[in-house]
Amino acid sequence: MAPVEDTAGAGIVAIGAYAPQHRMHNDEWAQYVDTSDVWIYPRTGIKTRHIAAAGESTAMVAARAGSLCLEAAGMDPADLRWVLVSTDTPEMWNPATACFVQAELGARRAVALDLTGGCSGFVAGLGLAEARARLREPVLLIGCEVLSQAMDWSDRSTAVLFGDGAGAALVMPREPGKPAFEIVNIYARTDGRDAGILGKPYGGTKNPLTPELVRDGHHHRIVMHGPYVFKNAVTKMADAALSSLEEAGLTLSDVDLVVPHQANQRIIDAVADRLKIPREKVFSNVEEYANTGSASIGIALAEAIEAGLIRPGQVVLTVAFGSGFSWAASVWRAAGVPPVRAELNRGAVLTKGVGT
Ligand SMILES: CC(C)(COP(=O)(O)OP(=O)(O)OC[C@H]1O[C@@H](n2cnc3c(N)ncnc32)[C@H](O)[C@@H]1OP(=O)(O)O)[C@@H](O)C(=O)NCCC(=O)NCCS
């Protein structure tokens, strides 16, 4: 490791984002389960989701976003010291997904580690990335999910909510004059007493898979108490937002744009209502991508920057909630706007999902 040397702070100096080519409309879900756009859209704000192609694994999706991020930064992968991948849909049990990503990128001097932090893993991971970047160790942080492979395609109450994709951020020590989102504060919390409410309980050491469990589809079972998750997501995202701003010495009136985790439009709206933030200050793209777990903030950030919604000098607040329960928020000041490379296949032709 490099010698310990603190700097003026750390920032996000480039963003990369990737979503698979296959776009699946709500209507297509009717082939798999008893559902419809009429049920899904009003309850979630979701119209389409991107679904990884057969053989397109988490590490491949993550590496694509990571590679785009490094291209945007003009950075040699060999200069990275850390590759952190936040995912709940890993390449395999072991080794870490980040190892495959590190190899694919050619980041040969980097330590590769995974974070399993649910949908808030990217924001919480930013705290770790920021701490290392302050020590002059460049970090590539990637949030990535291939939830289409993890979910139960016969369970309408969970499957219609999710999509696949990846978002990446290069976190470096701040350099005067170089565009970056200066990380002003990161606030993250977990309450493991609710660990059983949302997650994928089968296939680990607690509930090892047996032929009988696989036959009954437990290998794909996602447990979720929807209304309880909804209520907690709203209150905890609002609390995290206020706590992070308070620690940063700012208030909601200082915030120019909120980039929330894209779980569900109703959750985003309820958080905005609770905080009394006007809708035009809250970014949303859940209609296009659905809930992409820890990838959602990176993808949203890429689109918000590309749409010109973040300008130099502005304050950005990001906030997320997920399994654990875990929740996190972060306040950034735009010391310039970092470069973005995104391959989000937004206009791709709607195609049939791969299913299971
Ligand atoms: C999942 C969620 C959309 C359900 O919305 P809801 O308003 O609570 O659902 P409702 O109570 O109106 O409807 C439930 C009914 O719809 C049915 N239903 C569930 N999914 C359905 C679908 N895709 N299509 C049609 N019907 C469906 C249920 O079987 C249930 O039927 P029943 O009343 O006959 O038992 C909502 O609880 C939610 O968004 N929760 C948070 C989920 C989330 O974002 N998790 C990730 C956080 S990171």
Image: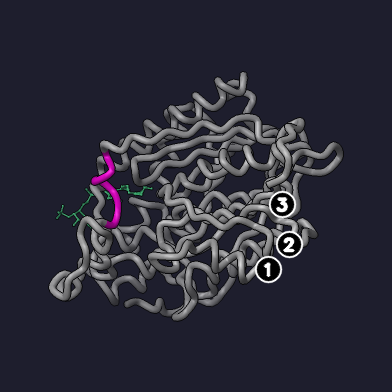
Q: Position of residue 129 (x, y in %)?
A: 61, 44
Could you classify mark 2 by the number of other residues whose Cα lies within 10 Å: few (under 14), some (14-19), or many (20 or more)? few
Badge 1 marks a residue whose secondary structure is loop
Q: Is residue 153 left or right of residue 1?
A: left
Residue under the point 37% across and 66% down: 26
Q: Quadrant of residue 49?
A: bottom left
Query: Pointer 1: what residue?
Result: 106
Ligand 1 contact, mark 2 (Cβ < 8 Å): no
Residue 195 falls within the magenta-colored stretch: yes
Residue under the point 33% across and 71% down: 29
130 lies above or below 104: above
Asked whether the residues under the numbered discs 1 and 2 touch, taking CB atoms below 8 Å apart as contact, a structural biologist would say yes
What segment carries the magenta color? Answer: 194-200
Q: Position of residue 101 (x, y in %)?
A: 58, 66
Badge 3 marks a residue whose secondary structure is strand
Identify the disc placed on residue 78: 2
Which amino acid type corresponds to the residue marked 2 in the rendered image? Ala
Which amino acid type corresponds to the residue marked 1 in the rendered image? Gly
Ligand 1 contact, mark 1 (Cβ < 8 Å): no
Identify the disc placed on residue 14: 3
Residue under the point 34% across and 62% down: 160
The foreground one among 25 and 208 is 208
